[in-house]
Amino acid sequence: MRAGLIGAPIFLALAVIGFVLKPTGGNNDINDVSYLIFAIGLVLCGAMLILALAAWLLGRAQRRKSRAP
């Protein structure tokens, strides 16, 4: 869970960097790397949040299982 909570803001910052680097008024958007950085940052940020959620749910299930008589 810690890896997901640490990784999510890092990859969100990567997405923000890609968004900031986006050129203004350029016609050749296909060869621009900033869109790729933005997309990769968003996808990996979402993956880290899903990883943290899955770890949290697994921890709750294991605690509930250990309390059962």
Image (spheres, rainbow, N blue to C red):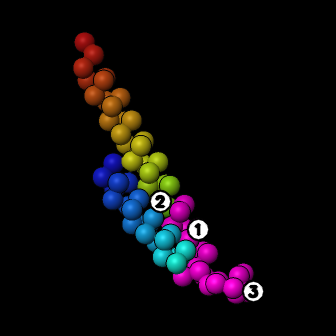
Spatial separation of the CA atoms under disc 2 and disc 1: 10 Å
Q: Residue at x 73, y 86 (%)?
A: 28
Tell me the kind of residue under disc 2. Cys
Identify the mark nearer the N-term, 3 or 2.
Answer: 3
Residue 15 percent location from the top left of the image: 50, 69
Determine whether the residue tagged by mark 2 lies in a helix, strand or loop.
helix
Residue range of the region highlighted in magenta in the rendering: 21-43
Residue 35 percent location from the top left of the image: 61, 75
Q: Residue at x 70, y 87 (%)?
A: 26
Q: Is residue 29 magenta?
A: yes
Tell me the kind of residue under disc 3. Asn
Determine whether the residue tagged by mark 1 lies in a helix, strand or loop.
helix
Q: Which residue is mark 3?
A: 27
Q: Which residue is mark 1?
A: 39
Q: Which residue is mark 2?
A: 45
Mark 1 neighbour density, 10 Å: few (under 14) some (14–19) many (20 or more): some
Q: Between 18 and 52, which is closer to the camera in this rendering?
A: 18
Q: Residue at x 33, y 59 (%)?
A: 6
Residue 26's label in the rendered image is none
Identify the mark nearer the N-term, 2 or 1.
Answer: 1
Q: Is residue 27 left or right of residue 63?
A: right
Q: Is residue 13 visible?
A: yes
Asked whether the beta carbons under mark 2 and mark 1 sit within 8 Å of each other, the answer is no
Q: Is residue 8 magenta?
A: no
Q: Quadrant of residue 13?
A: bottom left
Residue 51 percent location from the top left of the image: 43, 49
Residue closest to the far right: 27
In front: mark 3 or mark 2? 3
Q: Residue at x 62, y 84 (%)?
A: 23
